[in-house]
Image (cartoon, grey):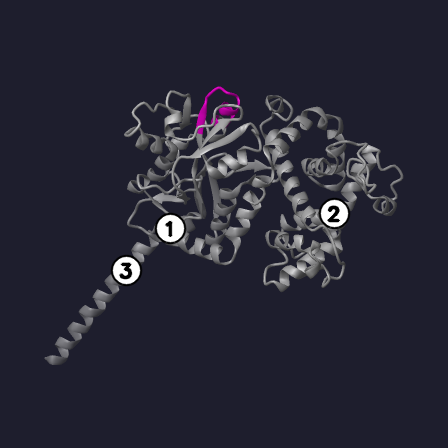
Amino acid sequence: MKSTLHKIEVFILAVAVLAILYVANQQYSSSLLNEIKRSNTLNVITRNSPTTYYVGPNGPTGFEYELAKQFADFLGVELNIVVQNEFHQILPTIVNEKAHIGAAGITHTKQREAYVDFGPEYTKVVSQVAFKSGQNKPKNIVDLQGKRLAVVKGSSHAQMLLDHKEFFPELEWKEYPDLTSEDLMLLTSDSLIDYTIADSNELAVTRRYFPKLRVGFNLGPEQPLAWALKKSEDSSLRKAVNKFFDKVERDGTLNHLREKYFGHVNDITPVDSHTFLKHVRERLPKYENLFKEAAIEFDQDWRFLAAVSYQESLWNSNAVSPTGVKGLMMLTRETAKDLKIKNRVDPHTSVIGGTEYFLSMHGKIPSRIGEPDRTWMALAAYNVGFGHLEDARVITQRAGDDPDLWMDVRKYLPLLSNKKWYEKTRHGYARGKEPVVYVQNIRNYFDLLVWLENKGELYDIVAQN
């Protein structure tokens, strides 16, 4: 009898365990993460802007795009980008399950926590009031009253203004559903509105395009940016996002992306931007075809070659430096001799020679170094010499940083002008700060040319600056 009861108890226990395992398996098999893997598609909604997603020289690019692509690769699925340029529609798209993740430079606010979940923060921004140079600088909320103030509908900036209106009842503004933050900054630059509000990272990037823009004041404290996900008891996707961000934070990927997209934007002044845009209109048309021909011949981006040439000579084919370098690409006598160039001030010859010399530097950089770091280092070598670049990479490695990352190497290049350091190097003294400025400037000029051409206004828009 006891034996029979024991068998029954064992049987009941086994059935219970199997039931638990079955339920757990059903829950797993129907989890959102598993559905994404089964469909082999991760749907990410974003917006078109210089800080999130845009079409670059080699296709889709941007900080948010690249981060989302790496997450899709992390999951082993394909990335499907949904572009929504009406910002106020992005979070509802997540809530209505039309996309899995919102990766669009979304600030994590208390109000938004009510209807979406957020992944880990990956940077912090502050809301800044933008105005046009020459106008009275706004210093506080009171200065915004009675002015033409506009923000993007559904943005955190609109919510901040609503919060302030409780204490400043005369504060008025317009919210535009179909205009982007970049659009409103252009309207501000053109004096069609007095002020707009933008995140600090977007304003820093966009001020290069509209050099008349200035920062008035910070509207509030720093706020984190994070991915948005649908609120759900199913935490499978959120856990995967957390795991991914932990990985890219630890292995340096996140820092590398920050450097790639934002590490240079503060290294150009409004005066530099204004002068560059003026020269785009007045000087570039004369040489544009030369850059395009060289780009085709050597499989390069013509805008990159144009950016290098501008940094070298300001697109002046007769330029001559005090040290004797000449032409659009400012070739030395020795380099010209090696390249069998007889006339350094001939525009065509100079562009071809400069491109060949850059590619020779690029070829010397170890192939294990990925892009864009390899290109930035090749540019530094173009400017200061390959030997001095290698000296800086050795110092970088000895300091415990990565000699294969431009963001690390650029910290140590300036040490080449310090006797304490250059005496220990193979190639000695160099003006090490110059290649850092050189590379950062070219990155900015290239960004400007890409942006102008993508807008279809390569010459028209600069007339406004």
- Compared with 425, 118 (above or below) is above
Q: How far is the residue under mark 1 from the one under mark 3?
A: 21 Å
- Viewer-proximal residue among 140 and 118: 140
| Segment tinted magenta in the rendering | 184-196
| Relative to 288, 142 lies left or right | left
Three-letter amino acid code of the residue under disc 1: Leu
Q: Position of residue 16 (x, y in %)?
A: 21, 65
Q: Position of residue 89 (x, y in %)?
A: 38, 32
Quickly name the residue at label 3: 22
Given this view, does label 3 or label 2 mark the residue nearer the observer? 2
Disc nearer the start of the sequence (3/2): 3
Quickly name the residue at label 2: 382
Determine the residue positioned at 75% across, 62% down.
426
Can residue 176 be seen here?
no
Element on which disc 1 rests = helix
State which quadrant residue 154 falls in.
top left
| Relative to 2, 286 lies left or right | right
Disc nearer the start of the sequence (2/1): 1
Q: Is the N terminus in the top left, top right, bottom left or bottom right quadrant? A: bottom left
Three-letter amino acid code of the residue under disc 2: Tyr
Q: Is the C terminus in the top left, top right, bottom left or bottom right quadrant? A: top right
Q: Position of residue 241 (x, y in %)?
A: 41, 51
Disc sitting over residue 40 in the figure: none
Numbered circles on residues, count: 3
Determine the residue positioned at 75% across, 51% down.
385
How many C-alpha atoms fall within 10 Å of the one at disc 3: few (<14), some, or many (≥20)?
few
- In reply to whether residue 290 is colored magenta, the answer given is no
Q: How far is the residue under mark 3 from the one under mark 2?
A: 64 Å
- Viewer-proximal residue among 24 and 311: 311
Quickly name the residue at label 1: 237
| Relative to 371, 429 lies left or right | right
Given this view, does label 2 or label 1 mark the residue nearer the observer? 2
